[in-house]
Image (tube, rainbow, N blue to C red):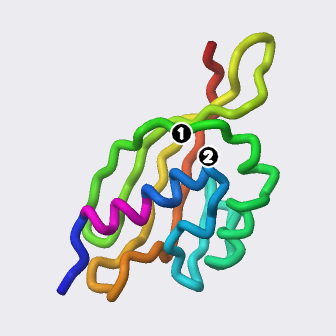
Amino acid sequence: MPLTDAERIAAAQAYISALASHRGDDVPFAPNCVRYELGIKTGRSGDHLRRSLNNGPQFKLIREVSTPEFTVDGDRVRAVFELATKPSLFGRRVGAKVDETFLIPADAAAARIHHIDASIRPTLTR
């Protein structure tokens, strides 16, 4: 029986939540999951991504994420959201608009993330 959209969205949401909670152990990565950010490989396996979310300095800077807008197209779950970081610059908070697409096959036995493509646009907010 195919996975529901809700099950696959929940897997993507676990990743997005872990960006701010720094609890990568809660994310259902496939063992061979890879992540690309603006075409550059930033994650080489599920374990690598999990360790990065738990302890990576690039993620420790993230303070919070907004509620994502999800769309599902076949095996792909797209999430658009914003994140805020802890540092500020001249009284303005550094953040980003994020557009990530997760490959989470509908015909799999469990909702696990197999691939992530990320596009990030930095922002400044008050």
Q: Is residue 105 magenta?
A: no
At 48% across and 47% down in the image, what residue appears?
A: 99
Which label belongs to residue 65? 1
In the image, farthest residue toward the left: 1
Quarter assignment of residue 122: top right
Which label belongs to residue 21? none
- Residue 19 in the image: above or below residue 36: above
Which label belongs to residue 20? 2
- Residue 39 in the image: above or below residue 7: above
Q: Which segment did they paint magenta?
A: 6-12
Q: Earlier in the sequence, mark 1 or mark 2?
A: 2
Q: Is residue 11 magenta?
A: yes
Label 1 Cα neighbours within 10 Å, binned few <14 / some 14-19 / many ≥20: many
Disc 1 to disc 2, C-alpha distance: 7 Å
- Residue 10 in the image: above or below residue 25: above
The x, y position of residue 118, in whole percent, is 55, 54
